[in-house]
Amino acid sequence: MILTALDRYYDRLLAQPDADIAPIGYSYEKISYALVISRAGDLIDVMDLRDTSSKKARPSSISVPQPEIRTAGVKPFFLWDKSSYVLGLGDNQESTAAKKEKRRNRIREEHEAFKAYHREVLGSTNDDGLLALLAFLEKWSPEKRDQYPQLVDEVLASNLVFRLEGEQAFIHEREQAKTIRMHLLEDDSTKPGICLVTGEAAPLSKLHPKIKGVRDAQSMGASLVSFNLSAFTSYGKSQGENSPVSEKAAFAYTTVLNRLLSGDPSNRQKLQIGDATTVFWAEADTPAKAEAAESTLAAFLDPRTDDGSETDKLRNVMESVSQGRSLRDLGDDLDDNTIIYVLGLAPNASRLSIRFWEVGTLALFADRLTHHFEDLNLEPRPWKPEPGAWRLSLQTAPIPKNGKPKAEDVQPLLAGELMRSILTGRRYPRSLLTNIVMRLRADGHITDLRVALCKAVLSRDRRLGVKGIQEEVPVSLDINNMNPGYRLGRLFSVLENIQISALGKKLNATIRDRYYGAASATPASIFPLLLRNSQHHLSRLRKDRPGQAVNLEKEIQDIVDGLPAQFPKNLKMEAQGQFAIGYYHQSKARKANKSNSEEGEDQ
């Protein structure tokens, strides 16, 4: 299913007039320089092809004949390669004389292989550009480097292509070069068979091309499908014969997946959730509808804080979904029936693991994501725009006292399960609430997003009819909410406010710093002590601000009146989530009232 969807996506992209996808037998690779040669085979110039739009020059992504998979052996590429193959020159920074000599021999071997390979495959050509390349390979020797000051160290550490003097196209783009390339792809050793992806009879691929761009996977690329040990094989079949995929389909799915995984800053079809590198794409009647759907999903999954138009668009989609209206009402290119594919990949040694795979219509995903944001909702809204999945997953990591959570501290499985629950509309992972509650108790950072996640877990469980979750979770302060955990959280906030009001804000540690964990888990052991201490603070307030003291005492009484006769000995995890929500709501309401009163005084 995954490979079939990727194969179809490749065909759709290739059919577009301005397609930026490599045709069969080619791939986009990082190329830094072009060697400009004369028709007689002399090196004329070294052309810098790097992208200099940012501070540091980066290699350009250029379509070249697809490289074969290299292991330890020497294997030249067709009409391009790194400098050790093309020029017989490369970096040699080995520590010992023996290693340096070994490296020199290796570079010499690679260069000779490059020349021999092209003499063989281009032997019958009559194309001017290809003949010029053959002449260059005959004339060139590594000892000529000193004659060309353009061959700086950066060139000798890069991939190189060729260009004929006076022409704009590269030599590998010439028509006869393409024809020869297609002949090279027709390998007699490949066996025909029925492709599991397309269902057609075609030559089968032994080894699938590598997939690059998955975080923490091998830099040279990893495989989604591979059979490199006898334990993985059956019935005496070898390599790709165990899972027959045609060469065309193997090329198609890896090429389009590498495109989706590209590190281009403008690529919004890729985002990182924990260790899961997530990509998505759309299938629609027209390219415009597919692009509109991909843009809408990107706004849901990875909102950009600096783009007001994207935020407005997201709000409009959510309002349309919540009111039961069709997405077509928002624009001609938005189609409810557009199919969306979401794929999450994670590293697994030399292979890739599928973290999640979800397929559905745009309307279905929009509905699920709208429900997700409704579950998270707090009032007044503490964020703009809605938080993306990556921001939510960071809340499960420790937050340093004067720092930010780190992506590497996010539990990979938890992040993947969180993303899956968002996309499917099913329950959030059971470990999510436990993780957040433990983080609140450990580091004391009661952030908007952490509280929102507690609320989301409880709200969704109630909406889905989970046994034992019956009470509605408020989005803002609800003084009539009788949930013991919620009321205890409110009471803890009031007691903290009494302490700060009496002793000032410059305290070494408040009761939240010292007692939040115990108060939220074992109220009976802590709240009697906190209430006794609050009387000392109130007596001080009665001298300086008697009116405030009376109001705070009334707040305590109103909250305690709704609690059981005795404080609970312990609170379950769901009640501890309610505790965090109650504390947050009470604290935010107090700050809002204080702000409003100050504004009234100013007026």
Image (cartoon, grey):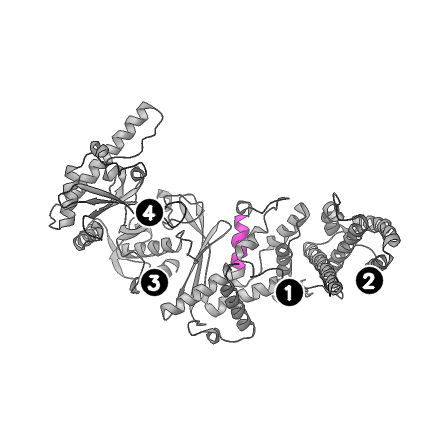
Choose the circle earlier in sequence order: 1 or 3. 3
Residue 6: image location, x then y, percent: 36, 59
Q: Amino acid at mark 2?
A: Asp
- Picture residue at 86% right of the left edge, 49% below the top: 536
Choose the circle earlier in sequence order: 2 or 1. 1
The disc label shown at residue 595, or none: none
Q: Is residue 438 above or below residue 326?
A: above
The disc label shown at residue 462, or none: 1
User: Disc 1 versus disc 4: distance between alpha carbons?
Assistant: 55 Å
Q: Amino acid at mark 4?
A: Arg
The residue carrying mark 2 is 558
Which residue is nearer to you in this view: 276 or 166?
Answer: 166
Which residue is nearer to you in this view: 66 or 586?
Answer: 586
Q: Is residue 297 above or below residue 114?
A: below
User: Crowding at label 2, few (<14), some or many (≥20) Cα neighbours within 10 Å?
Assistant: some
The residue carrying mark 3 is 8
Residue 203: image location, x then y, percent: 24, 55
